[in-house]
């Protein structure tokens, strides 16, 4: 078994990574292709879907050209992706426009409309998602704003759907991605919530069927795709789930009481449950694991990587210059600045709603804020403030999920780019007052896709056995009691209620901006 391997493909917001893993989760070879974002209007984020395929081909060719890769030992390829990013296509599965990304917030009016009718609670109970920036509401936006294009839509295609079609010629979707469209029947995830779709005036025929579970062979690599990618013709292509459900699987989270936090473009908090959780309060949404189980989730759209890139691109020239001069990683320098100020950050706090707020607010007009500034404060206080703000908000989201599931968090598994920083990990373990661990590979989403392939292709016949065999935990962090006390004071007495105090003002800011646009 040790000589066999599987490929994990992670088509994320900025790049597609293709990684070959052996049966113990060791990386054999990897390849990457990148692509740009298009942000032509405030709140809009788009991509060219052909870039996803070009990047996937590039990554596959890099892996398959490695001297460490023997095609005869390759069992299958699993995919994961940036979830509810989608592109409308015609009957030939040709894109009709650029793809609209998951973090695009153009559909705030449509979400507000659905909140009133058919109603936030009803929509949540049927789909596991209250009205928000999900695919369904962007379909409503297309109907109003691009009606001629809307009438020509054959299907709304998610990233994984698009890549599976390119690889195999099959057009399918999957449960662990369909959830976040906001249109899936959450109790019966092999079908769409057609009553909600129709109540919102969206065509029911534009949603892909069949809806497959994770770990399912969706098709096999075609002759044409084999020539373009270097993959073996006939290689099984296996369904996974969206990037975060795959990410927590690749981070080793399989049991209730474990929470996975992603320090990537979004700061995602995912909590494994033993069944469909309580849906009386719309404080979270519900995902489906590649293994088929339910996951409670909430996230901050502007996560660690997003906010650190925002900081670097707008305020970090000094750090960029220092990195070039010293031959160091700019991220090592920026994250390291958090060590220049103590826990609590001398009162500088950040509300991290730079791209709207999810549960419990569900407010696409929410905006970020930095407060507590004094002339003694420096760039280091802004950097640490961003990290602490994300940790505070993650704790708030986690507490709401604990209450709804009647399950206490005992362990944090951190993954994503920011998990490489000791400062980031220590801040989260102190804010939560819970032990934290990090897997050996930073590419847990790709590993989760590879685990899906390992199960789907028969390398392992059990999801937990596959995860325990392929995930290697190498770093452990424990809370510092002194820091825990400081963070509890700031969280309970300031952060927990701060946004409610300023929410009306933030909405007015958004309204004025819309008037002036």
Image: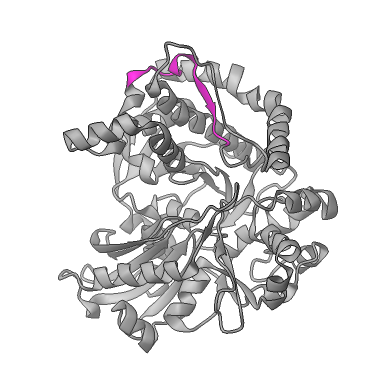
Q: Which image quarter holds the N terminus?
A: bottom left
The region drawn magenta spans: 340-353
Percent coordinates x, y for residue 170 in the rendering = 51, 82
In which quadrant of the rendered view does residue 196 lie?
bottom right
Q: Residue furthest right?
A: 117
Front-most of 403 and 450? 450
Q: Residue furthest bottom?
A: 223
Front-most of 302 and 262? 302
Percent coordinates x, y for residue 493 in the rendering = 60, 16
> From this viewpoint, is residue 422 visible?
no
Count the marks: how many? 0
| 329 relative to 120, above or below | above
In which quadrant of the rendered view does residue 501 lie?
top right
Left or right, 128 with respect to 398, comes to right
Percent coordinates x, y for residue 484 in the rendering = 45, 20
Residue 342: say if magenta: yes
Percent coordinates x, y for residue 237 in the rendering = 42, 76
Query: Which residue is at 42% across, 21% downward?
Result: 381
> From this viewpoint, is residue 514 visible?
yes
Query: Which residue is at 28% across, 37% downward?
Result: 330
Colouring style: one colour
Front-most of 229 and 181? 229
Residue 231: say if magenta: no
Q: Residue furthest front?
A: 516
In which quadrant of the rendered view does residue 301 lie?
top right
| 253 relative to 20, above or below | above
| 153 relative to 384, above or below | below
Query: Which residue is at 28% across, 48% downward?
Result: 440
């Amino acid at each position: 078994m040790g000589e066999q391997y599987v490929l994990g493909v992670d088509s994320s917001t900025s790049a597609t990574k293709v990684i070959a893993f052996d049966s113990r989760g060791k990386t054999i070879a990897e390849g990457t292709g990148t692509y740009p974002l298009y942000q032509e209007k405030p709140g809009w984020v788009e991509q060219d879907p052909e870039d996803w395929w070009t990047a996937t081909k590039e990554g596959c060719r890099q892996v398959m050209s490695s001297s460490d890769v023997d095609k005869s030992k390759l069992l299958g390829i699993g995919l994961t992706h940036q979830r509810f990013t989608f592109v409308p296509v015609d009957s030939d599965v040709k894109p009709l426009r650029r793809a609209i990304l998951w973090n695009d917030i153009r559909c705030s009016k449509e979400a507000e409309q659905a909140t009133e009718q058919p109603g936030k609670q009803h929509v949540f109970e049927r789909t596991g998602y209250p009205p928000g920036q999900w695919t369904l509401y962007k379909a409503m936006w297309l109907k109003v704003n691009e009606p001629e294009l809307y009438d020509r839509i054959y299907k709304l295609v998610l990233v994984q759907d698009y890549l599976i079609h390119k690889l195999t010629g099959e057009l399918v979707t999957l449960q662990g991605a369909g959830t976040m469209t906001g249109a899936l029947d959450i109790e019966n995830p092999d079908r769409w919530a057609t009553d909600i779709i129709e109540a919102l005036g969206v065509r029911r025929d534009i949603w892909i069927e069949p809806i497959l579970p994770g770990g399912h062979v969706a098709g096999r690599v075609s002759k044409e795709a084999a020539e373009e990618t270097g993959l073996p013709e006939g290689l099984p292509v296996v369904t996974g789930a969206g990037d975060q459900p795959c990410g927590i699987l690749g981070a080793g989270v399989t049991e209730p009481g474990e929470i996975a936090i992603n320090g990537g473009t979004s700061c995602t908090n995912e909590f494994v449950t033993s069944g469909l959780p309580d849906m009386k309060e719309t404080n979270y949404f519900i995902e489906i694991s590649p293994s088929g189980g339910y996951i409670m989730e909430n996230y901050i759209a502007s996560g660690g990587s997003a906010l650190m890139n925002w900081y670097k691109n707008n305020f970090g020239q000094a750090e960029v210059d220092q990195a070039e001069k010293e031959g160091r990683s700019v991220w090592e320098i920026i994250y390291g600045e958090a060590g220049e100020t103590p826990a609590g950050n001398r009162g500088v706090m950040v509300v991290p709603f730079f791209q709207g707020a999810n549960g419990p607010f569900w407010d696409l007009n929410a905006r970020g804020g930095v407060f507590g500034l004094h002339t003694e404060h420096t760039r280091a206080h802004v950097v640490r403030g961003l990290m602490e703000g994300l940790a505070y908000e993650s704790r708030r989201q986690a507490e709401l999920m604990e209450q709804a599931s009647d399950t206490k968090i005992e362990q944090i598994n951190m993954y994503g780019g920011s998990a490489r920083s000791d400062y980031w990990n220590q801040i989260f373990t102190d804010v939560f007052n819970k032990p934290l661990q990090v897997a050996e590979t930073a590419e847990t989403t790709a590993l989760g896709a590879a685990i899906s392939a390992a199960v789907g292709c028969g390398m392992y016949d059990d999801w937990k056995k596959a995860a325990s065999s392929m995930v290697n935990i190498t770093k452990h962090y424990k809370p510092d009691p002194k820091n825990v006390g400081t963070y509890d004071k700031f969280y309970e007495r300031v952060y927990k209620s701060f946004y409610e105090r300023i929410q009306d003002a933030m909405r007015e800011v958004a309204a004025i901006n819309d008037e002036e646009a």
